[in-house]
Image (tube, grey):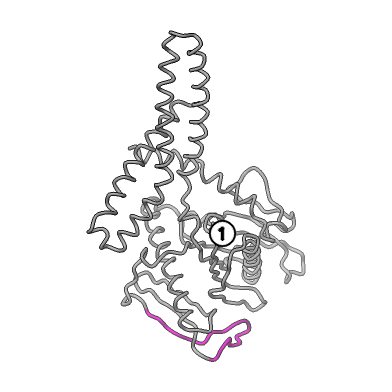
Amino acid sequence: MDIRKSERIYRYLDYIYTQFSLKSDQLTQPEIIQQRKKFQELSREVAALRPLTDRYAEYKKIHTQLQETEALSESGEDPELVVMAREEMARLHDQIEELTAEVESLIVSDALEENRNVFLEIRAGAGGDEASLFVADLMRMYTRLAERNRWKIELISSAYSGIGGLKEVILYIRGQEVYKSLRHESGVHRVQRVPITESSGRIHTSTVTVAVLPEVEDVEVAIDPKDIRIDTYAASGPGGQHVNKTESAIRITHYPTGIVVTCQDEKSQHKNRDKAMKVLQARLVDFEEDKQKKDIDSSRKNQVGSGERSEKIRTYNFPQSRVTDHRIHSHNFNIEFILDGDLEDMIHELDADRKKGMIDQKIDSALK
């Protein structure tokens, strides 16, 4: 057992317990109860800290037992007791190791965040018609992934290209651990293949951008009605054919940021407005997070909404039948499986890679 590591974890849990106690006490204060937004924020924070405080009680109990057993083993008064104490110490060390692994997992997990529904935005980048065709391919890939996980998927808006592709599409996906599975998808997706319009057989390289925006609650972001303009227009589908004759489609413009959101999936203007407002809220949260990242590292480029998204994250190579995620260096993936929504192994590896470094970072930040 790594003694220094377990002691560090113990100090971190002690800090978390202190924070949990302070925030729990605040929840009982009348002035906090009267502030709906503050009360909800504190309630979420307390709920997120509770699993770690439960582990702290276990850690504290085992540490006390270990200290008592160590004292007994060092007494040397009774050889049989010393042997029994050392055996007990070994058992307690094993328990601490198991508990440490549980705590590390809890440190990097956030059940509330991981279970958020998401707005998935896919847009054609470089490559013209070929990029728009790959938008349609990625839409199918994520639809198949949703089916595999029994998630619900709704079309928010879409814009078709002239050859049957999609210039852009916005999907709303809800279900268990949606954001946990899709948060790694934000970025530039590169495709290498021979386009159907290419007679010479040359391989073209095109790009598609993907943005994953977790859904936020109304209390998490306030939108001043004076800051937005809501326009209505007739919804249209592929080939310019009108889905309906009434002006049910909604376009919301947010003046302070310049963000524009459209929704035309529903025949009801009211439902389209509600969906568009949800997308706007998610984009505003993403916009604020992006501003913070730029303040921290102004040298990052911003192609799809955040610093990380500026990097090419994945290449789909059709001639070689492989998918390469550039954040995973161990191996490539079968392109047919991936495009059919079989992303489980890739998601698992990306999630494991994400956890590296996060534990030390969080502990160091808490113990400063």
Which of 17/193 is in front?
17
Q: Tell me what residue is drawn at x 65 percent, y 50 percent.
A: 345
232 falls in the magenta region: yes
334 falls in the magenta region: no
Q: Tell me what residue is drawn at x 29 percent, y 46 percent.
A: 22
Q: Tell me what residue is drawn at x 52 percent, y 34 percent.
A: 98
User: Tag 1: Cα neighbours inside 10 Å, few (<14), some, or many (≥20)?
Assistant: many
Residue 279 location (% of width, % of height): 46, 70
Q: Which segment is the magenta one?
A: 229-245
Residue 74 location (% of width, % of height): 43, 12
**What kind of element bears circle 1?**
strand
Q: Which quarter of the figure is the C terminus placed in?
A: top left
Residue 342 location (% of width, % of height): 67, 56
Left/right placement of residue 291 relative to residue 307 reads: left
Left/right placement of residue 84 relative to residue 65 reads: right
Looking at this rendering, what residue extends furthest in the bottom direction?
245
User: For mark 1, what is the residue?
Assistant: 188
Three-letter code for the amino acid on which mark 1 is drawn: Val
